[in-house]
Image (cartoon, grey):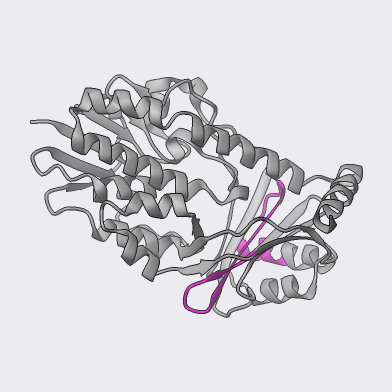
Amino acid sequence: MTTVRIIGGGIAGATLAATLKRPDWTVTVHERRAQRTDLDTAFALFPQALRALQPSGLRPAVEAAGVRIDAAQILTAEGRPLLKPPRLGALMIGRARLHSLLSAARPASTVFNLGEVDAPEDLDADVLVGADGARSMVRRTTWGARSAPRRPPLTVIRGVVDADLSNGSVTEYWGERMLFGITPLPGGRTNWFTAFPEQRFASVADGLDHLRTAARVLPDRVTAVVDAATVEQSVISGIHLSRPLPSFVRGRTVLIGDSAHAMQPNLGRGACESIIDAAALAELLNSHPPERALSLYRRRRLLTPQLIREAAGVLSHVALAGGRAARLRNRVLTTIARS
């Protein structure tokens, strides 16, 4: 019997398990955490990701759990318009809620195996799927230590506020080596995030204290969000970025989601590309033998996510420019916005 093992039960792994309809195969999801405790911050799902969920029947439930957003704007630290992106057509949904919906759709025939997988290369499987995140063990053991992610010197703080402070749109403020974003969340909540050159904090409370001081140069709307932030609904992290690969398939092993192409969050496309990866792989495995499916997947999902990853990196560099570069950036983008 054909055996598929999915290492990682996050967004990519949960989507694959939910959309892989092969009851004649043995499908196992390996997840190291007994209960995911992800903060319910926002994911933006663009039309491509929603279309990918259509064949499996998951799209209606996901859309019902989110809130549609079309308007977006990028402003200076003083609140002047820098750039107005095109109509988003995106769905904002809490990451914990999305994960819950995907996990609940996992077929009853799929085995869920709780526990760390220390040596994925030793598992008996016809298809071994690395869906274990940016620091993927599957990637490291199959592609080698040199494929490990790099970590840019940035600190990210993000959180949720139980009040609607978003004005129904996605807004980013680009200041001096700092950006601050505000988006809506379902249930009248607000999702917020900030990034700046790396700093180490002893606790989330210390990070919020720093942010409350740093945010004084930003408009009152940002100050209101930061003042409402709590330790319980905030998290501090770094960023791990994937190095480019010539292929996401090697033998029986395939990488999806952040394991393949972890990227800067500036384009809001990480979750989208994870879902598209998983749905594309499931479609091929549902229709073809493993070897043929992986051969087709190798070509289908190589270029686009890596281009998006590069574009997100460029946007991060522009957003966090400092000194004369920031002033030049603001001057150019303001001219574009007014033209």
Closer to the camera in the image, 248 or 205: 248
Residue that protrudes farthest toward the front in the picture: 339
- Residue 7 relative to residue 80: left or right: left
Q: Position of residue 150 (x, y in %)?
A: 59, 32
Q: Is residue 291 magenta?
A: no
Tally of numbered discs: 0
The quarter of the image holding the N terminus is top left
- Residue 314 relative to residue 39: left or right: right
The quarter of the image holding the C terminus is bottom right
Closer to the camera in the image, 300 or 99: 300
Q: Is residue 197 magenta?
A: yes
Q: Position of residue 92 (x, y in %)?
A: 50, 64
Q: Position of residue 334 (x, y in %)?
A: 85, 55
Picture quarter containing residue 24? top left
- Asked whether the viewer can see residue 8, the reply is no
Where are the magenta residues, as a range? Answer: 182-209
- Asked whether the viewer can see residue 57, the reply is yes
